Every structure is written in C-alpha cells, then in structure tokens.
C-alpha cells in the first residue's frame, strides 16, 4: 500500500476537517441525551417512547454502515463523509422544529443515516491519511472528538435548554454543522492510496464471502456490539438517571454528566497512544481489564450513597469503557487488509448501530417495567460486559500480528 506524497501539514489539515465533522455529530448525538428530558415533558412521552426517540437514530445508522463501508472501499472516503455531515447538520436543525412524537422519530431516523456513514468513512479516511504505525493514535483523536463533543453537548445542552429551550440547542448545532459541511466540501481531499503488495503488484480484492467466514471477524463484532450496548445505554440514560434518581435540575445534570465524558476522553487518547507504542498486539488485555473495571463501577455506582460517589464511579467506568472501545476499534485499522477496511468496519459499526438502537429502548422498557427503578437496566449493561469479557478471552490475533483477513500477507504500509 503506497500513500500519495503530501506534506505532514496537509495530512493534519485534512484530518482536522474530519475531526470537526465528528464534533458536529457528537454534539447532535449527546445533546439529545439531555434534550430528551424537556422533550419528553413537552410531548408527554413515556420512558419507552423516550428510548425509541433515541434508538430510532441508531436503527438507520446501523443500516447505513454496511453501504457506507462498501462505497468507501470502492470510491474513497470523501463523498461519504461530506454527505454524512450534511445530513447530520440539516436534520439536527429540523429536530428543533419537531412538534410530535412521530415527527421527531422520523427526523431522528433520517439523521441516523448520516451518522452511519461518518464512522465507516472515517475508518477508511485514516488508512488514506496515515500509515499503520500511527493509526491507533489518529483513531483515538477522532474518538476524542466524539467525547469532546459529548462534554460540550452535555454542558451546553443543559444550559441552553434551561435558558432558551431545547429547540434552540438543535438550531445552533445544525447551523454550525452546515458551516462545517461547506468546509469539508471545499477542502476535504484526502490523498490517493494505491493498494499493492510489497512487490508492486495490485492487491486483489477479497470476496465478501471470505470476509464473513472469518471467526475472528465475528468475535470482534460480538465484542463491539456488547461494548456498544454498554456505552450507548449508559450515555443515553445517564442524564435521566441523574435527574430522576438523584433529583438534580437540568443545568446541574448537564454539568455533572460531562465529568465522566472528560475522563473517557483522556482514557481514549492514552489508550490510542499506548496501542501504537508499547501495547501493540496486547489489545486483548486492555479489553479484559476494561470490562472488569466498567462492570464493577456500574454496580457500585447504582449503590453509591451520594451523588459525589456516584460521579466518581461513573468517571472510572468511563475510563474502562473508552479503553475497551479504543482497543476494539483499532484492531481492523492495524491488522486488516487495506482493501477491505471499509467493509470490515462497516460490519462492526452495523453491530454498534444495532446496539445503539436496542440499548436505550430496552433500558427504557426495563425502567418502565420496574416502576422507575434503574436497577434492572444497570444489570442489563453489566451482563453485556460479561459477554465482552468472554469474547476477549477467546480472541486471538494471528501470529506475528499479521493481517487477520488478507489476500496477501505482504500487505504493508510503506
């Protein structure tokens, strides 16, 4: 695989535009987790309906990831990313205009189509922009962009919604997103990559049937699905948990909910750096430790005697959660053949999108079923972490950390 020769400054500028796109997406995503509180009150939604509003986004996102992966592999990342950010921005703006349960459900469903294209296209973009040796760090910065957006969204959403109403929040995010879309359209031009073996021959395309026969692929997909259930289930319901169980107002909810996000951000950056350096090939260990830490803190958080102790456990949980996500996400970037990165990650993100669809609705239904208690919902998340732990136990990288699935093991970055 040969990258086009462009300057380091040009590569970093292109990556910065990609980072802005992720920031907009996360503002929309995490902003809804706070906005759903006043939306539910205004539109008279049940807990189950509130979960459906959050989950509708993930259903369409999951469906789009597979298509986006194929398009990105075939045509490159540019078209997928520009269109994805445009859809996210436009329908974030339209979210502020919704006046009924069905309307907001439909808008969030369409918005999810954009979200489904962005992560998959970005996975291909990283392989276009950077060599293998630094891809974990690059991915950690994108993941950090999502978490930074989460921190900003949780604080700003609570503040704006409390001051001017939840609709204004979506108008602001959508407007910013449309500006970012214009910047991407004009300046986002990733370098061309030629896929070849070390002998200079064209790298043959791997049939999709061979991709889906891989046991390692399905092990990774199952781990990513269950870890996504935990991540999106927790982040979707944390603001509501703080407001309903701990009796906090909307502004305080946003301020406190961003603290665990900040710890997750730091953990993501550190994990990405370590995977590129001293922990390359040891992703399994990171996942195992992260699953234990996250599961234990979820249990302790629910039993915490005070809000201060609960936030402390939430913050430690976020460290483990981010470490798991980074370890799983970087596996295909470092160990999967270049010409199927999009399809592989599309399959992963499809599973993650399904998890995002299932988790909030399931948790909402469990909360309704247990008369407002979050206990069963938290045990649902802990059970998912147990599966992640088991998946990590059976996961094995190929010897010498060669490609997991490749038509030619000599596929290397030069």
Image (spheres, rainbow, N blue to C red):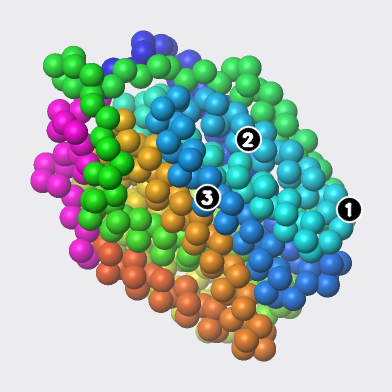
Packing grade of label 1 (10 A; few <14, some 14-19, many >=20) is: few
Packing grade of label 3 (10 A; few <14, some 14-19, many >=20) is: many
Number of dots carrying numbers? 3
Q: Residue at x 63, y 35 (%)?
A: 85
Q: Nearer the viewer, mark 3 or mark 1?
A: 3
Percent of width and height locating residue 151: 62, 51
Percent of width and height locating residue 155: 70, 54
Percent of width and height locating residue 71: 46, 32
Does label 3 or label 1 sit earlier along the sequence? 3
Q: Is residue 406 magenta?
A: yes
Read off the magenta span: 393-414
Q: Report the predominant secondary structure element of the magenta stretch.
A: loop
Q: Which residue is mark 2?
A: 85
Q: Which residue is mark 1?
A: 164
Q: In the depicted view, which residue is nearer to us: 385 or 351?
A: 351
Q: Residue at x 67, y 47 (%)?
A: 110
- Find numbered disc 1 in the image and state the secondary structure of the residue it sits on: loop
Q: Which residue is mark 3?
A: 63
- Side (left or right) of 220 relative to 38: left
Q: Nearer the viewer, mark 2 or mark 3?
A: 3
Relative height, residue 23 to residue 228 (above, below) = above
- Specify the farthest residue to the left: 399
Does label 2 or label 3 sit earlier along the sequence? 3
């Amino acid at each position: 695989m040969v990258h086009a020769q462009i300057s380091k400054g040009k590569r970093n500028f292109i990556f910065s535009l990609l980072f802005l796109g992720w920031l907009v997406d996360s503002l929309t995503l995490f902003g809804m987790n706070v906005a759903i509180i006043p939306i539910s009150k205004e539109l008279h939604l049940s807990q189950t309906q509130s979960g459906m509003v959050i989950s509708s986004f993930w259903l369409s996102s999951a469906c789009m990831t597979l298509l986006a992966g194929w398009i990105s592999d075939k045509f490159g990342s540019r078209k997928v990313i520009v269109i994805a950010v445009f859809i996210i921005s436009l329908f974030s703006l339209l979210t502020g205009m919704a006046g009924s349960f069905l309307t907001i459900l439909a808008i969030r469903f369409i918005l999810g189509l954009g979200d489904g294209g962005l992560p998959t296209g970005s996975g291909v973009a990283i392989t276009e922009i950077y060599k293998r040796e630094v891809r974990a760090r690059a991915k950690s910065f994108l993941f950090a962009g999502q978490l930074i957006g989460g921190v900003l969204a949780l604080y700003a959403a609570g503040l704006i919604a409390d001051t001017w109403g939840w609709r204004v929040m979506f108008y602001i995010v959508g407007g910013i997103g449309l500006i970012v879309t214009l910047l991407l359209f004009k300046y986002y031009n990733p370098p061309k990559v030629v896929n070849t073996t070390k002998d200079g021959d064209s790298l043959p395309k791997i049939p999709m049937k061979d991709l889906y026969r891989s046991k390692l692929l399905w092990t990774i997909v199952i781990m990513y699905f269950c870890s996504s259930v935990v991540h999106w289930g927790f982040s979707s319901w944390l603001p509501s948990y703080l407001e309903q169980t701990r009796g906090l107002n909307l502004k305080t909810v946003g301020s406190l909910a961003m603290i665990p996000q900040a710890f997750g951000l730091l953990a993501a950056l550190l994990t990405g750096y370590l995977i590129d350096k001293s922990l390359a090939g040891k992703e399994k260990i990171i996942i195992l430790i992260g699953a234990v830490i996250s599961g234990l803190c979820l249990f302790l958080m629910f039993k915490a005697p005070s809000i201060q102790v609960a936030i402390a456990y939430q913050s430690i949980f976020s460290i483990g959660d981010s470490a798991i996500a980074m370890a799983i996400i970087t596996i295909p970037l470092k160990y999967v053949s270049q010409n199927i990165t999009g399809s592989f990650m599309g399959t992963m993100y499809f599973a993650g999108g399904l998890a995002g669809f299932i988790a909030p609705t399931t948790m909402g239904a469990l909360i309704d079923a247990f008369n407002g208690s979050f206990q069963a919902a938290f045990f649902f998340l802990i059970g998912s972490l147990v599966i992640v732990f088991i998946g990590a136990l059976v996961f094995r990288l190929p010897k010498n950390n060669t490609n997991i699935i490749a038509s030619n093991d000599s596929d290397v970055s030069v």
